Amino acid sequence: MQDPTQNEPPFTETWRVLILVPAMNEEESLPKLFAELALRAPEYEILVIDDGSSDSTAQLALAAGCALLRHPFNLGYGAALTSGYRYALRHGYDVVVQVDADGQHPPCEIERLLAPIRAREAEVVIGSRYREEEAGRNPYAGSIWRRLGATVIASIARLWIRKPISDPTSGFQAMHRKALELLCHGGFPDDFPDVDVLITMHRSGLRLLEIATPMRERFAGISMHGGFAVPFYFYRLFVVLMLLPFRRHSPYRKERQELGKKVAHQRQQLRNERKLPLPSAGEIT
């Protein structure tokens, strides 16, 4: 039987990949990041989303040859990503890879994030800093509060997704355009889009996969998850998770279920045909 995805163009030949770099006041980190991207991922285009920076972030992006979107003022991390997703859809990209501007996400790991999408094993691939021991690396040296928070959030995510996700707050992700279409039409949060977005994608029928990736300390600057942002983040997450059962789903889960039923029916027909006895010579006219 023919594979339903057989007519889809091969990833390496025609699929277009866009690297998204949301940034706000990252002039100290961007030059080093752009140098690494040029070395490790020269074949992919880069889009910098300048979320209301007051420094030379935009000028550095243009000087490096990147495409640039500029928000007139700070709209939030989620809004920056949404702008990037919409740009990718408008310009015909098939896959995006999110890379933070602060240098925590090593560009040398981009191909590993793309591999499961290339193999059609997932629509969303998450790079986890907390599974590094599986890859023979030292665990990410985050603060005890960050690790505790990640453990709690991962436990909540496991209840919804029904599979282990150790780092649901990771921004190091690769996404197929199906995920982008869902997020651009599904009320993507403007501030800290993390576990609630993963749960929404899972409930909509998209396949999620987590792999171990190393992460580093920021090149420069201060994390957006510092200070009073931490308790606010947990409060917001709790409210969002309580409202998740009332959110609408995308059609992908229904489409995947219908496709699965159709494939199962075709397989059963083939099995039945193989069991039919061949006609004898006297029965052939």
Image (spheres, rainbow, N blue to C red):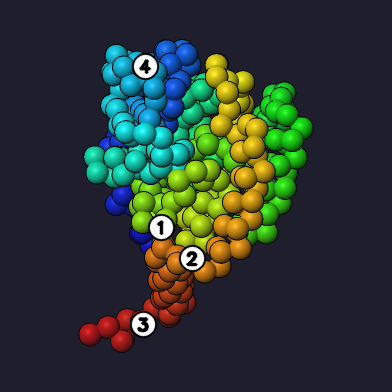
Which one is in front in this view, the residue at disc 3 or the one at disc 2?
A: 2
Q: Which residue is mark 1?
A: 186
- Dot placed on the residue nearer the N-terminal end, 4 or 1: 4
**Quick check: 157 above or below 285?**
above
Q: Which residue is mark 2?
A: 247
Q: Amino acid at mark 1?
A: Gly
Q: Quadrant of the C terminus?
A: bottom left
Which one is in front in this view, the residue at disc 4 or the one at disc 3?
A: 4
The local secondary structure at tag 4 comes to: loop
Question: Looking at the image, which residue is at 47% across and 25% down?
Answer: 101
Q: Quadrant of the N terminus?
A: bottom left
Q: Are marks 2 and 1 in contact (CB under 8 Å)?
A: yes
Q: Amino acid at mark 2?
A: Arg
- Dot placed on the residue nearer the N-terminal end, 2 or 4: 4
- The Cα–Cα distance between marks 4 and 3, rounded to whole angstroms, is 83 Å
Which one is in front in this view, the residue at disc 1 or the one at disc 3?
A: 1
Q: Amino acid at mark 3?
A: Ser
- Dot placed on the residue nearer the N-terminal end, 1 or 3: 1
What percent of the width, then of the height, locates residue 283? Answer: 31, 87
